[in-house]
Amino acid sequence: MRTLITGGAGFVGSHLCERFLAEGHEVICVDNFITGRPVNIQHLRANPKFRVIVHDASQPLFVDGLLDNVLHFASPASPIDYVKSSIQTLKIGSLGTHVALGIAKAHGARFLLASTSEVYGDPVVHPQTESYWGNVNPVGERSMYDEAKRFAEAMTMAYHREHGVNTHIIRIFNTYGPRMRLDDGRVLPNFVGQALRGDPLTVYGEGQQTRSFCYVLDLVEGIYRLLQKDYPHPVNLGNPSEITIKQFADEILKHTGSKSAIVYRPLPPDDPKQRKPDITLARTLLGWEPKIGREEGLKLTLDYFRTKV
């Protein structure tokens, strides 16, 4: 088996490279290192089945030889990154998805799109099911990411319907684990970095907005299982254990032993008030649900972050 992963040097992408290598695949990692990091895949470079192509995945790419799978994970995924690179985010979601689908079509390969729970926007349905169409501001400060992913889903379904490409779509909810960047702006690395440095933890709004956090290896397992199925429609992958941001800040303080204070700042525009996946479909279709609880996952993640602060 031969698998191409765009964004393969990113947080999730690097774990996927590991998993597919462990399953005996040849893996081609495509990354331009805008948000991915060479260190994430450094330990894989000695493997003769691993190849890195330094390339902007929104630009045309020719891959020789046979391909069995194409996984499109290239995209800025944190607010700091996609606001800073808003046009690139839109291009990788549109042009990049077109390029990746074209590669899959040319090789007769299975295709999997990394979409996001952000397609639900600030939801008025809770928990979020795959049948919910979302509540997204198309011109808001987060629109470059939300709409890029919504377009990517539409493009993926068009290739499935018009060209018969064997497509898969996952909607990823908040995911965490080793290889996240401390400076990527997402809530977990923000809190952990602040706590380990002894800085105040920054909570936006009153901290009553909710999130649910899935450990990265649980996510990778769900992705691998979905790729074996002939199911083209979106599937939620995430942990339905819901927690408020204030409660999560308290958990981080407890696990780090930090004496940091909590400070409150205004809530950013269009920040979702609730985020919790309904994973009924993943349970029935894939026999999948998260196995690693937040306490165990946080310990593994904190062990990694302590070496980075």
Image (cartoon, rainbow, N blue to C red):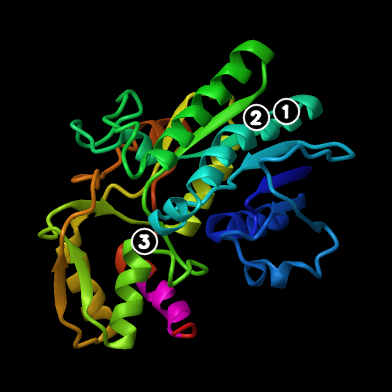
Relative height, residue 58 to residue 105 (above, below): below
Q: Quadrant of the N terminus?
A: top right
- Give the distance between the C-alpha atoms of the residues marked 1 and 2, in whole angstroms: 6 Å
Name the residue rendered at 58%, 38% in the picture: 91
Q: Specify the amino acid type for callout 2.
A: His
> Which of the 4 image quadrants contains residue 12?
bottom right
Within the image, what quadrant is residue 193 found in? bottom left
Query: Label 3: which residue?
Result: 186
**Secondary structure beneath label 1:** helix
Numbered range of the magenta stretch: 298-306
- Indicate whether 80 appears above or below 87: below
| Chief SS of the magenta region | helix
The residue lying at 65 percent from left, 32 percent from top is: 111
Asked if the magenta segment contains residue 303, the reply would be yes
Residue receiving disc 2 = 98
The amino acid pointed to by label 1 is: Gly
Specify the farthest residue to the right.
65
Instruction: Establish if 240 lies above or below 60.
Output: below
How far across and down, in percent of the image, does residue 216 sit? 47, 58
Label 3 packing within 10 angstroms: few (<14), some (14-19), many (20+): some
Label ID, residue 102 = 1
SS label for mark 3: loop
Tag 3 and tag 2, C-beta contact below 8 Å: no
Mark pair 3, 2: CA separation = 28 Å
Q: Position of residue 247 (x, y in %)?
A: 16, 65
Q: What whole-number distance in Å separates the C-alpha atoms at marks 3 and 1?
A: 32 Å
